Amino acid sequence: MIILAVAQNTFREAVRDKVLYVLLFFSATAILSSKALGWISIGQDIKIVKDISLAAVALFGVLIAIFIGTNLIYKEVDKRTIYTIICQPMRRYEFILGKYLGLAGLLALVTGVMTIVASTYVLALGGTLDATFFMAAFLIYWELLLLTALAVLLSSVTSPILGAIIVFTVFMVGHATSILNELPDHISGAARAVMNGAYYILPNLSNFNIRAEAANGVVVAPSYVAWAIAYGAIYTTVLLVLASLAFEDKDV
Amino acid sequence: MILRWLVVAPLVLVMGLCGIAFTQARVDASVSQEFNEDLLYLPNEQLLTHFTGGMSSVIADLLWLRCIEYTSQEWRGDFKFTWLEQMCRTITNLDPYFHDVYSWGGMALAMLKQDDDASIELLKDGIRHHPNSWELPFEIGRTYVLNRHDEPRGAIYLAMAVATGNAPDYVVSWTEDLQGIHGLYDIERSMWQDILDNNDEEHMRELAARKLNELSLREVADVLTDVATQYTEKLGNPPTSLDDLEREQFIQGKPVDPLGGTFIFDADGEAYSTTVLDGIKEERLIPMRVWINQFKEKFGNWPEELEDLVGRTHAPGVTVHPYPNGVWKYDPETGEIS
């Protein structure tokens, strides 16, 4: 109940943030202007619109998660509003979870709206949509949940700027971890073992990326999506537990 | 104040824009071809795939646009297409499902750059990602026929295109012609016999046995077509049934189909085995039923007519009935097709 109250407040606060609307505006502009590229693409206009739409949902979702997520806890501490909150009868982990769920709700709203805009636009242009398109949008949301959990963790232990840099770096590296599992033969021994270990430890965000399949109408097995969701859920849970522990130990 | 905003500011703006446009034109003019090609060089597309932050599909789209522009430039310029393969490879590494890059790139590499090997390799990669595409094996077949004048091998790839069940009629017709001319039935028979003798899976052996029977029936149909041609030359009109051939003593007896079918003739006197046609019909019905169900799932009702499937489902067109003058029996009340 307390968690929900914090979540509602966080959601309301985040919805009022002007950064959100600026990012939404740029996202919608990117989606709607994607047709311009399609005109010169020799019959690939719908594919390009789908590609850019899903990329916009992912990129602007990540920016929202970074800008709002890394400020989430830090702002409360910095403005001293945390004192009025933690003196309430609630545990610190409830505060963290409430904050996280509030932002998760906001991201659900944002990705939902952007997906509706994108799919309406594709249909208006005469394209067709299949289940893979919506699976791709859902996995983008799942990726955002993981990154938001990381942002919340960093927000409770470091400054927003450093947190934003780290989350963005993880976003970029997280899409490149497969390189650690496809090492050339000359890397062997301990170095190979460390890199292979890092492959399993670092967040593999490529798991949530089926955007190429969605744009090309390739069917994705539901079992793949289920495993990707399970992966994201476990990783997010671990990050949220760490965030709670970090906030428990924090002197405010 | 007014003077500043009404005169000075617009003047500065106009002069500035003119200056920018002029400078840009000079920059464009001073770009050498070599510089342009250096820009195209993407040193390691495998690594590039890893560092796109999940945006590889969008980057593939942008490179695709650049590829079209580059091809157009080369068409009007040096006609070397030096970077075409590299660009296609990079795009397909970034987005392995980008079908048109395989088909268009394969065709451009073979026809424009005359690089058959690169074309065939690219198209084979495409087939791995799009096994149901008829265009990709068709392009390989076309490259073998037109560039290498290797019709037997071309016919094999054209047969692969036909086997997808999506190939248009002209591809089916070309394939049949090529197979007839080059005696490819023997190759086909060897391949199916190999599966029948050596494959571990029972259903594959059953399929091979059926295909071998169909192959024999197709050979009989070819012989009957030749006989029908002689009949037409003599009597002025093609036979309508085996009875005509038997009555005029062009054949001693009617050929027997062990699978229970018979042989029919079209208006031009071409003979067909009904067993073979029934097999093709069943193969073509499979995707049709999928598209009809797709329509039902999407719109909540069965399509009024089969043409409604086109553009609203994944159907590229209404598949042609294999029987001469045959039409699909479709019931819009139940969605049943036969």
Image: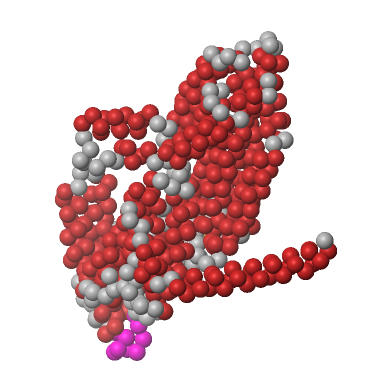
Q: Residue at x 78, y 63 (%)?
A: B5
Q: Residue at x 21, y 31 (%)?
A: A189
Q: Residue at x 55, y 34 (%)?
A: A161
Residue B135 lies left or right of residue A69; in this view the side is left
Q: Position of residue B314 (x, y in %)?
A: 50, 56
Dividing the picture into quarters, in which one does residue B184 lie? bottom left
Dividing the picture into quarters, in which one does residue B147 lie? bottom left
Question: Was residue A215 drawn as part of the magenta stretch in this picture?
Answer: no
Residue B260 lies left or right of residue A218; in this view the side is left
Q: Position of residue A118 (x, y in %)?
A: 61, 50
Q: Is residue B241 above or below residue B280?
A: below
- The foreground one among B183 and B329 is B183
- The foreground one among B197 and A20 is A20
Can residue B292 be seen? no
- Quadrant of the drawing holding the N terminus of chain A: top right
Residue B11 lies left or right of residue B79; in this view the side is right
Span highlighted in magenta in the image = B231-241
Q: Position of residue B179 (x, y in %)?
A: 25, 71
Q: Is residue B198 above or below residue B35?
A: above
Q: Position of residue A16 (x, y in %)?
A: 72, 35
Residue A133 lies left or right of residue B158; in this view the side is right
